[in-house]
């Protein structure tokens, strides 16, 4: 892959597994859509494609967001935080669905109540049945 040893990649503080946490934020609404991980290959590929490519820790391979679902994330901007150990992607989310549950955001459960008897409540609707996407 071209650019894998590029100087800009060396600025990122990769963890002991060669990964960096990534937050995907919708550029227009500023909604936080999801959290994922990238390795050097994923970040370089994201820049090359202009679309989000993550590292799947469970599958141990690159994961081009939307490769199965069609819910591609077009990258508008990439930022690195002050400690240089977290990446922020500002994206255009195709079809407004980022979550594998068919919701706009992976953060669809909201804590309500207090420390003694609080609960997580589902507050965002399913926009598309995931069964129709992931067969």
Image: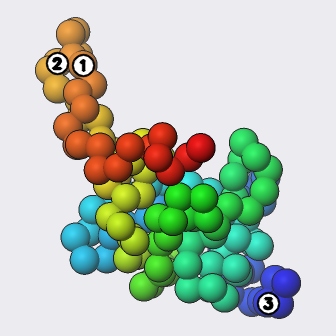
How crowded pointer 2 is (Cα within 10 Å; few <14, some 14-19, many 20+) is rated as: few
Q: Secondary structure at mark 2?
A: loop
Q: Secondary structure at mark 1?
A: strand
Mark on residue 3? Answer: 3
Q: CA distance from mark 3 to mark 2?
A: 49 Å
For marks 3 and 2, give the one nearer the viewer.
3
Q: Is residue 67 above or below residue 17?
A: below
Residue for badge 2: 114
Mark on residue 34? Answer: none
**Circles 2 and 1: CB atoms closer than 8 Å:** no
Mark 3 / mark 1, whichever is N-terminal: 3
Rendered location of residue 62, percent (x, y): 74, 62
Residue for badge 1: 119
Q: Residue at x 35, y 49 (%)?
A: 128
- 96 left or right of 66 in image: left
Q: CA distance from mark 2 to mark 1?
A: 8 Å
């Amino acid at each position: 892959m071209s650019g894998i040893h590029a100087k800009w990649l060396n600025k990122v503080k990769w963890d002991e597994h060669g990964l960096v946490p990534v937050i995907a934020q919708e550029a227009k609404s500023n909604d936080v859509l999801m959290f994922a991980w990238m390795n050097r290959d994923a970040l370089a590929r994201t820049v090359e494609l202009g679309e989000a490519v993550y590292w799947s820790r469970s599958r141990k391979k690159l994961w081009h967001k939307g490769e199965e679902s069609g819910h591609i994330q077009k990258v508008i901007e990439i930022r690195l935080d002050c400690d240089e150990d977290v990446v922020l992607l500002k994206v255009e989310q195709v079809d407004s669905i980022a979550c594998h549950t068919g919701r706009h955001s992976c953060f669809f459960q909201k804590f309500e109540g207090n420390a003694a008897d609080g609960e997580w409540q589902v507050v965002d609707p399913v926009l598309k049945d995931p069964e129709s996407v992931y067969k």
